[in-house]
Image (cartoon, rainbow, N blue to C red):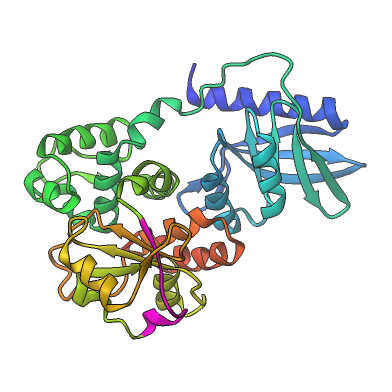
Amino acid sequence: MSTHYKNQNVLHCALEALQKTTGITGRLTQPEPLIAQDKYADAKIEITANGQRYEYMAEIKRVDRFALLAEFKCQAGLYADQLLLVSPKISIEIAEKCRELDLQFIDAAGNAYLCQKDLFIFVNGQRPNEVKDFQLENHDVKRAGNASNLRMAFVLLCKPELLNAPYRNIKDVAGIALGAVGWVFFDLDERGFTLGAKRKGGRILVERQKLVQEWVTNYPIKLRPKLNPRKFRAPTNDWWKTVGITRYMAQWGGEIAAEKLTGHLRANTQTIYFHTNEETKDITKFVVDNKLRADPRGDIEIINAFWNFDDAEPLPETVPPLLVYADLIATLEPRNLETAKLIYDQYIKDTHTKV
């Protein structure tokens, strides 16, 4: 069964379940409509309630992580506020988060959140009457969440010129085994993210925004926890404003990087990525110089960097925007999501802009 057919099957079941639980009817009006340049929704549907018709652009996904919701929220503008998530099953917790983020959804169990003019529906806690095997892109999850894939996808998104670089160069920049480079390229080729591998120097990155979304979703749960994150606390809240971060071979990430990139966010937490091995003298000196103390509930987080851009001389104050975006998305805080959207629009959305 093709992925397209499976997606349409989920949509059909979700619309059928919506009618059973609410009496509201819906129908497919257009498959894969264009919503922005090179960006297509899975379907355009029409929902009829109280004699009125409401149009939606449907994205059919298995939504099992909060990070996915934040990603959808940041890109909702592409859908002209008509985004509708359609999923085999939305858990009670994710349904509540959807309502908090004002993300409309329906699922194949009959749960729903619809909120437009003269329309408000919220159904939560419904369970499917029968178990259905909706295989939505599950074949990609294991490979996409592999640490080597995430490291290498990051450097290719930030430095697309590496697509045709010698494998040894890619290994050094991504911090992965030499033997892993070919396997990651094989995976990207097989899943349609790269083309032209058979021509020397001809490999190109396609489906770039989809790869960005996949990376942002998987990074906080598959790679970030492996980067030895440590929490600290400082004597004052503004301690970081006078710190020359690059002299410690480190860069600002998270909210501080977002503040510096956009001028829009006032940082409440501090994230620092160190380009050194864990527990090295640079980290120790940084902690001592700034009078930091270990605190598992502290608002300062020190993380090992996982890339090495040799041309970054001098080392920039902030990590690449893609990583800032991912860290903001992972917080699920509305103020951070708003700033993440600005970073996405300014630094990531344009395929010619470094991420």
* Image coords of residue 255 (percent x, y): 45, 69
Magenta-tinted stretch: 230-241
The residue sitting at 84% across, 55% down in the picture is 117
Which one is in front, 347 or 247? 247
Q: In which quarter of the image is residue 240?
A: bottom left
Q: Quadrant of residue 254?
A: bottom left
Q: Is residue 292 above or below residue 26?
A: below
- Residue at image coords 24%, 46%: 152
The residue at 43%/56% (across/down) is 326
Whether residue 174 is situated above or below residue 254 in the rendered picture: above
- Judge whether 97 appears above or below 237 on screen: above
Q: Nearer the viewer, residue 232 or 276?
A: 232
Q: Which residue lies furthest to the top in this view?
A: 130
Residue at image location 64% in from the left, 15% down from the top: 131
Q: Indicate the position of residue 77 as horizontal and vertical percent values.
A: 60, 59
Left or right? Give the position of 7 relative to 165. right
The one of 30 and 5 positioned closer to us in this rendering: 5
Q: Using the rendered image of the protein, determine whether residue 353 is visible from the camera's viewpoint.
A: no
Relative placement, left or right, of 317 versus 341 is left
The answer to which image quadrant residue 323 occupies is: bottom left
* Residue 194 lies in the magenta stretch: no
Q: Which residue lies furthest to the bottom in this view?
A: 242
- Residue 146, image x and y in percent? 31, 36
Which quadrant holds the C terminus?
bottom left
Horizontal side, residue 239 vs residue 22: left or right: left
Whether residue 231 appears in magenta in the rendering, the answer is yes
261 versus 94 height, above or below: below
Q: Give the mark count.
A: 0
Residue 289 in view (yes/no): yes
Residue 213 position, x and y percent, is 44, 48
